[in-house]
Amino acid sequence: MAHNPLVSIVVPAHNAEVTLARALDCLLDQEIVDWEAIIVDDASTDRTPATIAGYVEQDARFRTLSSCAYSPAGARNNGISTARGHWLMFLDADDWLDASFLTKMLAALKTAPDAVAAYCGSRRVMPDGALTPSSIAPEVAIQPFDTFARRCAIRTHALLVDRATIVELGGFDVSLRTCEDWDLWQRLARLGKNWVIVDEPLAFYRASANALTRNSTQMLVDAEIVIARGFSADPRVKHPASAHANGANPSDGSTASEALAWFALWNAASDCGRGSGSINPQPLRALPAGRKWAREIAKVAFDGLMVGSLSVPAQLAAKWDRFGGALTELITELGKLWDNPAAARRIQYQLEEMLLDGDDLAAPRRLARTLGIRVDVRNPTSTELREGIDQIYAYLMMDGQIQAVVQFGVLGKVTRDHWIELIRNFAPQKEAGADTSNTLAAEALSATAERGPDPDSHFGRLARLAAQARELVRSSAEPAEPPAAPRRARTRHDKDRTSFWNGYFATEDPWNYGSSYEQEKYQRQLEILPAGPIGRTLELACAEGHFTRQLAPRVGHLTATDISAIAVGRARARCGDQPNIEFGVLDFCADTLPGGMDLIFCSEVLYYLDDLAELRRIAKKFAEALAPGGSFISAHAFVLRDNVEKTGFDWNTFGAQAISETLAATEGLVLEQSIQTELYRIDRFRRLSPDDVVAEPVIDHVPISAPIEIGVARNIVWGGARALRRDVARNERRQHIPVLMYHGVADEGPDALARFRLTPNAFAGQMAWLRANGFHAIGSEQLEQSIANRQPVVGRPVLITFDDGFQNFADHAWPILRAHDLTAEVFLVTDLVGESAKWDAGIGPPTRLMDAGTVRRLAAEGALFGSHLATHRAIDGLSSSDLAAELLRSRMFIERWSGRPTTAFAAPFSVTDRRLGRLAKECGYRIGFGGRHGPADLDSDPIDLPRIEIRGDRSLDDFVATLEAVLQER
């Protein structure tokens, strides 16, 4: 009985005398010997039959068949018909395998008994023997049918497959001149069975000028047939998996037309590589134009170029003159099909970068938009640019060694001075950690302005763009009004109480006494007055007399005092028509209080005493100044230092709880009544008479009905704090700083944009958590300074950023931020300020953007602003000139509106490329945010800082977990 081998290898051969021996020798080299090889001579007219005969005579594992199929598909089917092995593979006569192929493939299959196939990676071998990088498709092991419905992801000989299944499927389709292997793998995958991957390049594919894959016309015809089959039922597969019975689902990936367009792209690039002069772009119409596809389109084109030009990556750029014109025309036409020239430019940049990444630049490579060159760092020379080139890719060389690789956008000729500045930055001999690039760029711009630069040089043209931007800003209809001046900072006089309080009253109405919140508090103090007539009353710390005026009609005689003569003067003027008021300057800490008082008022001032010992001393003075039976009324806010677990003001002092406890402990005073809100309490104490009986105090808990203004709200931590800012400032120094990225804060909007939109309640919850956990907000300039100085940030810093500048930031986010004593940096799209987010128009009604007046108002209130460029176009699709122009005019407009220097930008769509950082520095920026995710740290590049996107479709728990993870890093 004949032995059935473990593996049958079918080798079709037609006129293969040159390559066949290499293919068959690789079988003899296999570590596993249990195989048979069926060599099918398909009507060869050269010495192929003689070669076959020699191997058959040498080794009984070789068998031969004669065929007149005149096609690989028919020849392989003939071989299948006589194969005896459990596993089957197909090796073309010009390809070969690694010696470990069978060992590793069979081992993988052994680990997955239900597998129908195993596949490995492969490498192309060019005619000169050069190898391309390994290629493998991991997605085949995950979704084999969805993959093969759209593309052929595996080389013919990179597969070991179950023979019985192939026989059941009918073998290869002989009606297909090309793509017949793809068609069979698609049918095999439709069964829904397991495929296993061997992630190594074990198969080698010889690329040649005579390969069928270079017949692009036939390939496209056959590919269309195979793809159409993949998206419909296939009667040839008798028992398909139910999920695949009706073909691939377009919603799970690309459509059939998109799949064909991807294949057509590869074919077109291959034709370009062969030197075809004109390529029809119409089959590419269905390719996706989105930003995320640019890299993939460039990769497919790159692969097609390799096959068409029979070149490995390191050889392609040198052959640009052969295919560059046709390829650039193809990409340009693709942009026209999409009506999106920026998308085409993005692909061009990506592809040219890939071409130069593998090149040694032994000679200058002048591509369509990029010049690749070597530069001698010891003796750089000026570099002229060909029309259309606006990017340089350079090796900085010393003694034949690459010192640095630089890629940057250029607007014109790169002078020797420009190269010297670049070399100092990228191949530096400077102190570690000292980034001089901003300074050098500024000096270069300044120097060129002073000496009258060559107008065709890079800095000459940049200076011209800057002048145009300044003129545009100057001629803008938007008035350049400075922001409102902030209130003058108060000077502290720690050892001189009078000067300290006069400093407060240097500005009239320093606490906004007329606010609804303060007036409601005044009304409740009047409600707690003792019953009956009140004779002599003393008001301590009367300030400017706002409460004095309301109290006077309720008492017989009122002595209103304050330590500040300025305040007393304003109080006297305010209450001049009240005949029962006597005003005086009094320091109740140092001066003797008048005695025999029926009522003493002392509110909102005892926090300022030095300590509780001084409070106890003053409380005793209050008691002694009261007549027996007299009342003392005090209104003070709750402060976190008294009880960190309850709502309170984040002041570095004691508060209402400590004050009330101290007064209650003062000999002769007893609490009679207390009105308590979540934020403050108003207490009335009585001086006991000898015969008084002490009763339980009346405690009334009441809500706060009045709105709380920002100046008050920003000091409140609702619900208590888990950490106080002053405590973490003493104990913590942070090298990792969370930079949070938000977009919109609104209750409603398009569902497709939910990720980029938080509700006001959700945002308020996040800001409350930050405040309660001791975080303080910083700006990008402070972060940049910390990085430049490698100086950790004190406490718990957070940089809160908002992209786009939506009006809902002003309507919802900004009031919430201010209420939690936080600020944010907003990146504006300056050409669209006052309009709407047109870039989202295809998704739903565009969100309104803040106008310049709103920007000015918010800047005066403490909001920070940076650039989101001028038009919100992704920068990788902009020419270098357009990118520089947007950077310049955006910065200048924001400086006009905000009244302060603008040094930060955030890239639209978080998309960057290698040109952005340097151009941004040359245009006056020091800080940039790109597409990297995570916290910033002291090692971050300040012009390419990471951020943490805060998504609207995530919970508060997710937010907390993200921030706590950063806290763990310190």
Image (cartoon, grey):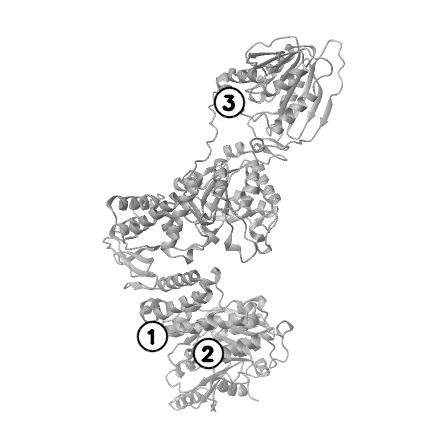
Residue 90 location in percent, x, y? Answer: 49, 80
Quadrant of the snapshot with the N terminus: bottom right
Task: Tell me the residue that label 2 is attached to.
Answer: 219
Left or right placement of residue 787 versus residue 817 in this view = left
Secondary structure beneath label 2: helix
- Foreground residue, 54 or 449? 449
- What amino acid is labelled 3 in the image? Tyr
Q: Amino acid at mark 2?
A: Met
Q: CA distance from mark 2 to mark 3?
A: 84 Å
The image shows residue 559, relative to residue 360, as above or below, that is: above
- Packing grade of label 2 (10 A; few <14, some 14-19, many >=20) is some
The residues bearing labels 1 and 2 have C-alpha atoms spaced at a distance of 25 Å
Q: Which residue is mark 1?
A: 128
Percent from the top left, x then y, of residue 411?
32, 54
Measured along the vertical axis of the image, is residue 897 above or below residue 1?
A: above
At a point 76% along the width and 18% down the height, the residue shown is: 695
Image quadrant in which you'd find residue 760: top right
The count of marks equals 3
Q: Secondary structure at mark 1?
A: loop
Callout in the foreground (2, 3):
3
Q: Amino acid at mark 1?
A: Asp
Q: What is the x, y in percent for residue 906? A: 45, 48
| Quarter of the figure with residue 410 | bottom left
Quarter occupied by residue 122: bottom left
Which residue corresponds to mark 3? Answer: 504
Q: Earlier in the sequence, mark 1 or mark 2?
A: 1
Q: Dot 1, how many residues are within 10 Å of its Cα: few (below 14), some (14-19), or many (20+)?
A: few
Q: Is residue 468 visible?
A: yes
Name the residue at the front extreme. 477
Neighbour class for label 3 at 10 Å: few (<14), some, many (≥20)? many
- Decide which of tag 2 and tag 3 comes sooner along the chain: 2
